[in-house]
Image (cartoon, helix red, strand yellow):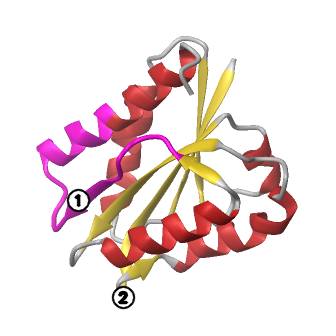
Amino acid sequence: MKTLLFVYASQSGHTHALVTAAAAAAGGEENVVVRVLPALQAGIDDLLASQALVLATPENFGYMAGALKDFLDRTFYPAQGKVEGLPYAAIISAGNDGQGALTAIRRIASGYPLREALPPLLVKGEVTPQSLEEAAELGATLAAALSIGVL
């Protein structure tokens, strides 16, 4: 069994809705255990036990949520030399364009170094049925790739 870990921050519920859709779709894949944790509850043991990661955040002031940054801060040094190449994807719920949050996530992920496995999902404005479908597709694709050993 392989573990796909979703670490998320959400205040308005938009990011949580996207993560819920992605995790539900990923959960249908055999040989993959899906874990969904709020960023303030996730830690180094959760990260080290995963074979793929989804980082999900709202865009706050053109940056990722402080809770997600906290998770990355707490796990960065303990993870050094232990997660090289770990595949990840990003989900960003944006009020603007989401580029500031995405740039920050990519910059920090490169320091671990993690490997971006899929293009990020940037949802601008309200969460729509279309954006929930896109989140589900991201989750299902990541889980399927993990299950068959592509990642």
User: Would you name the residue on which mark 1 appears?
Assistant: 123
Amino acid at pointer 1: Val
Q: Nearer the viewer, residue 93 or 77?
A: 77
Residue 109 in the image: state x and y as whole percent. 60, 61
Residue drawn 57% across the image and 47% down it: 115
Q: Nearer the viewer, residue 39 or 105?
A: 105
Task: Classify residue 53 as left or right of residue 11.
Answer: right
Which numbered disc flags the more N-terminal residue, 1 or 2? 2
Task: Classify residue 46 as left or right of residue 149.
Answer: right
Q: Nearer the viewer, residue 54 or 16?
A: 54
Q: Is residue 32 visible?
A: yes
Which span is picked out in magenta? Answer: 116-137
Residue 133 in the image: state x and y as whole percent. 21, 37
Number of numbered callouts drawn:
2
Amino acid at pointer 2: Phe
The relative height of residue 35 versus residue 93 in the rendered view (above or below) is: above
The 10 Å Cα crowd at callout 2, few under 14, some 14 to 19, many 20 or more, is few
Residue 128 in the image: state x and y as whole percent. 13, 51
In which image quadrant can residue 100 be found?
A: bottom left
Quadrant occupied by the C terminus: top right
User: Would you name the residue on which mark 2 appears?
Assistant: 61
Residue drawn 22% across the image and 74% down it: 97
- Say whether residue 4 is magenta: no
